Image (tube, grey):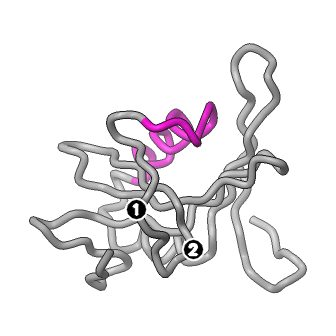
Amino acid sequence: MRWLDNGRLVTRILVSMAGGGGRYELVYSRSVLGHLKAIDRKLHVMIRRELEKQLRVEPLVETKNRKPLRRPVELGADWELRLGPQNRFRAFYRVEPQRREVWVLAIGEKVGNRLVVGGEEIEL
């Protein structure tokens, strides 16, 4: 983890892209740390691995579980990734293609038709 100039704490994980096409850097916002505290700790490694697998290559390509949001959410995210058992988790992110960065801004859990992020229900 490191401090950025604007005072926000982020975690940076460098991930090399297959085929030598460069790399995308995953950047986790400080709020994600709090979001993960509301999720069972034994699932944290699975979530991180899935984020790395899904977002390190072509994070702007729509797939079955990766979709652009119809309207940007309050968090500043433009994309949603569904992951985990029965796709019960959601990661919200935006991509800075010129800088080759993926900003993971929120991680939540679907409970029925509700989305809970950091222990609080949010509306999309």
> In the image, 18: left or right of 72?
right
Q: Which residues are magenta?
A: 44-62
- Quarter holding the C terminus is bottom left
Q: Residue 118 location, x and y as percent? A: 37, 78
> Nearer the observer, disc 2 or disc 1?
1
Identify the residue at the far left of this view.
112
- As for residue 48 lying within the magenta part, the answer is yes
Cα distance between the residues tagged 2 and 1 = 13 Å
Q: Which residue is labeled 2 in the image?
A: 76
- Quarter holding the N terminus is bottom right
Above or below 118: residue 77: above
- Residue 70's label in the rendered image is 1
Q: Secondary structure at mark 1?
A: loop
Q: Quadrant of residue 89?
A: bottom left
Dot 2 amino acid type: Gly
Dot 1 amino acid type: Arg
Q: Residues within 10 Å of mark 2 (few under 14, many from 20)?
A: some
Q: Residue at x 49, y 39 (%)?
A: 49
Q: Main secondary structure of the magenta part?
A: helix
Q: Residue 122 location, x and y as percent? A: 31, 81
Q: Residue at x 18, y 43 (%)?
A: 86
Above or below 24: residue 27: below
Q: Residue 26 location, x and y as percent? A: 67, 50
Q: Secondary structure at mark 2?
A: loop
Q: Residue at x 23, y 53 (%)?
A: 88
> In the image, 88: left or right of 34?
left
Instruction: Pick whichever, 96 or 118, lies toward us.
Output: 96
